[in-house]
Image (cartoon, rainbow, N blue to C red):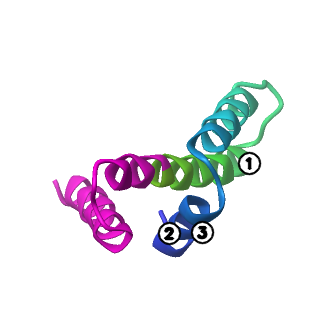
Amino acid sequence: MKIPVIRQLFQNTTPAQLENTLEVLEAFCEFRGVSEHEIDVAGEMITNICGALEVHQMVSEGAAEKDALNAFGQKVMGSIDR
């Protein structure tokens, strides 16, 4: 998870574009010939896309962009600490 990447995705793409990309990456990970390294890279991209989607949701509910980004980062870090 990289907050600067999530910010860029949030600012430059629509939720629909992010969802379409997410579907493609998930399908890519299911291919038989995909290496572990490729899955790791796609997994990182999936995490960032999901973060941008969550930020879009929070902003649509009235949160400021900065607050939504910080809240997502704290949520992820909190789940890692458990």
Q: Circle 3: is it few (<14), some (14-19), or many (20+) Cα within 10 Å?
A: few
Q: Where is residue 56 in the image (x, y as percent from the top left)?
A: 44, 51
State the residue at coordinates (32%, 63%).
68
Give, as a single range, the part of the protein colored magenta: 53-82
- For the residue pair 75 and 81, the one nearer the viewer reads as 75
- Residue placed furthest toward the right: 33
Q: Position of residue 74 (x, y in %)?
A: 24, 65
Residue identified by numbered label 2: 2
First of labels 3, 1 by sequence position: 3
Mark 2–mark 1 Cα distance, whole angstroms, equals: 18 Å
Q: Quadrant of residue 39?
A: top right
Q: Position of residue 6 (x, y in %)?
A: 52, 64
Q: Is mark 1 on a helix, strand or loop?
A: helix
Residue 3 falls inside the magenta stretch: no
Q: Circle 2: is it few (<14), some (14-19), or many (20+) Cα within 10 Å?
A: few
Residue identified by numbered label 1: 38
| Residue type indicated by callout 1 | Glu
Q: In this view, does 19 lie above or below 31?
A: below
